[in-house]
């Protein structure tokens, strides 16, 4: 039997005093892929931000454990070291910080957390080369400032590249398909699939069924008004694609 | 009301002969007129326009000693030099307080005709050459200029004759050191003749950190037609050091002037830059970088006067202020009547890293002409929280992420430096400044001095 990786219980969170999450329960085991779908404003991005530790959100109630570690007690950097990775819906541009320095700082911070020596320059560059190949990321991008001047597709590829380098236990992909053309979608999804093992897990947050054609979920959850209101298998995504979200709204608003 | 000038006027009145005995006739010949002009005058206070954030009067008020008898003050050159000055291949000299000390064999390494020496020696050896420029670029009637003229006994003279292009940068290391509180009146004269080229690095250090220091520095620069002069100044002084440095530049046609002023550590610093673009097709790049912490106070003030058509000037000043540090920037661009096709840009960007740091900026444009391209912009803000969270979510600890972002903020200022090897060294110095290991040999990973 596979081991439990993420356990979220009754999670409530607010942003600027407004309650967005109203009691989320979610359990993810090693080796699984979960999709979280839902209409705009249902709290999908808030859930990913809260789990990653974005200081813009305040947790007011509930618990979240990653392989038994209390996530809510940890600063974002330690959540990353413990194996959580968030692929941003809108990856941030950081002018003046080169991709190489950014990744070296990230990799060596994690090694330091586990009392390991920093990687040598040659080992680091070798690793960058290998990981770049997974998402076909151009070497030229790696020498530029983080995400600066990257196209939408390049930014998303860069997210998956960082995921490949950091080898998380749990990856949350927040709207990774938004702004991608079909070719870029295939490359990004291919990267995610290549990184999948029976020891890690993935949560895919998406509006559309489209991405789920490439990344096959084991479970589909529907988040509505800050709560998971329905859970099913892959067929639930197809049903949403066909019927839209109105029936979910009706079921829950009445 | 007590006037802070009085003590300096008294000093001059009672010690005229001693002051003259230890300087050059040319410098001495200017003192009396300076003294006369100072009678009844006063130094700028915070009520003086242009000095709202820095009182020069207060800066000069404490009772400092002035080493008018030129007692030799021993200084550990190696200690201050050891790691903060880049291992560039340069032609090196030191100025201890206000007296010039060449590195060994300096004179023999200089190309023929080039002078890099003590100002008072040069004024004795080449009185006609020095007289052509000394006191003629800085406005003689200005109070702080006159004060410097009245008391300055030495400093630096640099002369690059017509057509000579120096292959190595000159490097000047200013060191403050004294067993008691000391004021130094330093004078620098730089003449780059037609078609000549000069690169220069100036570093300021302090020793005997428990003592207070005051420097009054007047720098006069004459750039002949088609000459090029690039300089970078890096201040790493102590919390008890006050500095009032004024640079006056005169550019003839087709000359290019690039200056980068970096303040890494200091007490109270005020830097003035007054640049006159006399000829056509002049180019000026004036850049400044300030990293403030503790109670540092840094005020940069620039005046660029476009006095002929078709010249270009660009200014970029960036500050990162932490703790209770305060910064000020006042920059003005004047485009005189008739200076058509002028291009003049000015940008001042600042980051406040604490809730108690303060920044004041005052950009000004005065344009008396059509057909010009001019702009100015000033912003003061905080670190980008989205970028900070993005970095932390990748595992980069908050303190390190902040340092990386602050360093990234300075990259375009550092990019204005073109002296070989200096850009990399500046990046390294800024990195160490932000990570708190500046001036700390044990924490330095540099291989350059081992």
Image (cartoon, grey):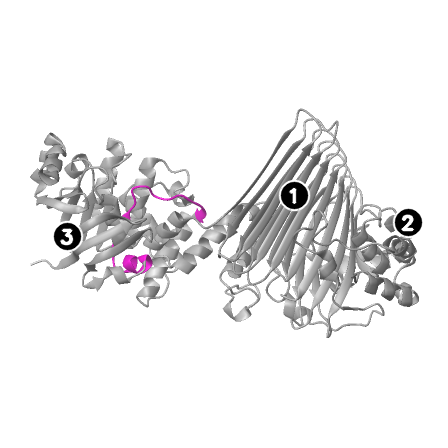
Taking A70 as reference, is B119 left or right? right
Answer with the quarter of the image where residue B57 lies: bottom right
Q: Cβ–Cβ below 8 Å for labels 3 and 2?
A: no
Residue B358 position (above or below residue A235): below
Q: Please check whether the numbered discs 1 and 3 fall on a single chain.
A: no
- List the residue tagged with mark 3: A26
Q: What subunit carries mark 3?
A: A
Which is more N-terminal, label 1 or label 2?
A: 2
Question: Which element is circle 1 on?
Answer: strand
Residue under disc 3 on the same chain as residue under disc 2: no
Is disc 1 surrounded by few (<14), some (14 to 19) or many (20+) residues within 10 Å? many
Q: Position of residue A67 (x, y in %)?
A: 18, 61
Mark 1 lies on residue: B331
> Which residue in the rendered view is the most extreme toward the front?
B1
Based on the picture, tell me whether residue A93 belongs to the magenta stretch. Answer: yes
Dividing the image into 4 quarters, which one contains the C terminus of chain B? bottom right
Relative image position of residue A55 (x, y in whole percent): 33, 53
Relative horizontal placement of residue B16, taking residue B144 as reference (left or right): right
Give coordinates of residue B144: x percent, y percent. Answer: 79, 54
Chain ID of residue with mark 1 = B
Q: Quadrant of residue B61?
A: bottom right
| Residue in the foreground of this view, choosing between A187 and A1 | A1
Task: Read off the magenta span.
Answer: A76-97
> Crowding near pointer 3: few (<14 within 10 Å), some, many (20+)?
some
Whether residue B383 is visible here, answered yes or no, is: yes
Residue A27, numbered label: none
Which chain hosts label 2? Answer: B
Is residue B269 on the magenta stretch?
no
């Amino acid at each position: 039997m596979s081991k439990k990786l993420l356990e979220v219980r009754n999670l409530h969170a607010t942003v600027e005093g407004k309650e967005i999450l109203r009691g989320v329960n979610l359990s993810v085991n090693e080796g699984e892929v979960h999709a979280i779908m839902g209409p705009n404003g249902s709290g999908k991005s808030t859930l990913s931000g809260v789990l990653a530790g974005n200081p813009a959100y305040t947790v007011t109630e509930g618990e979240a454990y990653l392989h038994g570690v209390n996530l809510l007690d940890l600063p974002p950097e330690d959540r990353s070291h413990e194996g959580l990775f968030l692929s941003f819906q809108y990856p941030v541009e950081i002018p003046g910080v080169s991709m190489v320095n950014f990744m070296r700082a990230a990799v060596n911070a994690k090694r330091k957390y586990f009392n390991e020596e920093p990687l040598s320059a040659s080992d680091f560059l070798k690793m960058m080369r290998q990981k770049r190949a997974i998402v076909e990321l151009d070497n030229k991008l790696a020498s530029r400032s983080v995400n600066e001047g990257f196209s939408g597709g390049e930014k998303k590829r860069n997210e998956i590249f960082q995921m490949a380098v950091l080898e998380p236990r749990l990856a949350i992909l927040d709207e990774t398909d938004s702004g991608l053309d079909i070719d870029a979608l295939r490359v990004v999804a291919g990267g995610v699939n290549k990184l999948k093992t029976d020891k890690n897990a993935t949560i895919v947050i998406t509006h559309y069924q489209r991405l789920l054609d490439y990344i096959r979920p084991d479970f589909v959850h529907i988040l509505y008004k800050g709560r998971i209101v329905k859970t099913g298998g892959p067929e639930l995504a197809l049903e949403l694609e066909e019927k839209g979200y109105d029936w979910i709204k009706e079921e829950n608003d009445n | 009301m007590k006037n802070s000038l009085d003590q300096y006027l008294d000093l001059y009145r009672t010690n005229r002969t001693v002051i003259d005995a230890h300087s050059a006739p040319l410098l001495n010949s200017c003192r009396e007129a300076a003294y006369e002009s100072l009678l009844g005058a006063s130094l700028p206070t915070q009520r003086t326009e242009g000095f709202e954030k820095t009182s020069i009067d207060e800066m000069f008020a404490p009772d400092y000693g002035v080493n008018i008898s030129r007692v030799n003050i021993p200084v550990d050159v190696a200690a201050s030099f050891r790691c903060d000055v880049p291992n560039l291949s340069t032609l090196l000299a030191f100025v201890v307080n206000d007296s010039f000390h060449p590195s060994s064999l300096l004179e023999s390494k200089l190309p023929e005709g080039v002078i890099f020496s003590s100002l008072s020696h040069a004024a004795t050896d080449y009185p006609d050459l020095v007289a052509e420029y000394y006191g003629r670029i800085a406005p003689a009637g200005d109070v702080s200029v006159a004060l410097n003229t009245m008391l300055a006994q030495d400093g630096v003279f640099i002369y690059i004759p017509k057509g000579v292009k120096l292959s190595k940068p000159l490097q000047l290391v200013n060191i403050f050191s004294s067993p008691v509180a000391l004021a130094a009146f330093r004078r620098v004269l730089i003449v780059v003749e037609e078609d000549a080229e000069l690169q220069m690095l100036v570093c300021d250090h302090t020793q005997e950190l428990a003592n207070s220091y005051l420097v009054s520095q007047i720098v006069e620069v004459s750039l002949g037609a088609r000459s090029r002069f690039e300089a970078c100044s890096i201040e790493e002084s102590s919390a008890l050091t006050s500095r009032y440095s004024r640079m006056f530049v005169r550019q003839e046609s087709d000359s290019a002037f690039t200056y980068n002023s970096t303040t890494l550590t200091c007490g109270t610093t005020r830097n003035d830059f007054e640049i006159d673009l006399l000829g056509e097709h002049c180019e000026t790049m004036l850049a400044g970088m300030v990293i403030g912490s503790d109670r540092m106070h840094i005020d940069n003030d620039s005046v660029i006067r476009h006095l002929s058509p078709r010249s270009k000037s660009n200014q970029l000043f960036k500050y990162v202020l932490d703790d209770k540090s305060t910064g000020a920037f006042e920059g003005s661009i004047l485009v005189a009547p008739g200076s058509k096709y002028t291009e003049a840009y000015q940008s001042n960007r600042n980051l406040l890293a604490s809730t108690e740091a303060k920044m004041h900026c005052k950009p000004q444009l005065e344009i008396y002409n059509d057909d010009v391209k001019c702009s100015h912009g000033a912003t003061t803000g905080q670190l980008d929280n989205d970028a900070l969270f993005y970095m932390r979510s990748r595992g980069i600890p908050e303190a390190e992420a902040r340092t990386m972002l602050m360093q990234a903020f300075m990259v375009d200022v550092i990019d204005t430096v073109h002296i070989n090897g200096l850009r990399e060294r500046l990046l390294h110095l800024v990195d160490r400044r932000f990570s708190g290991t500046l001036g700390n040999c044990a924490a330095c990973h540099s291989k350059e001095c081992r």
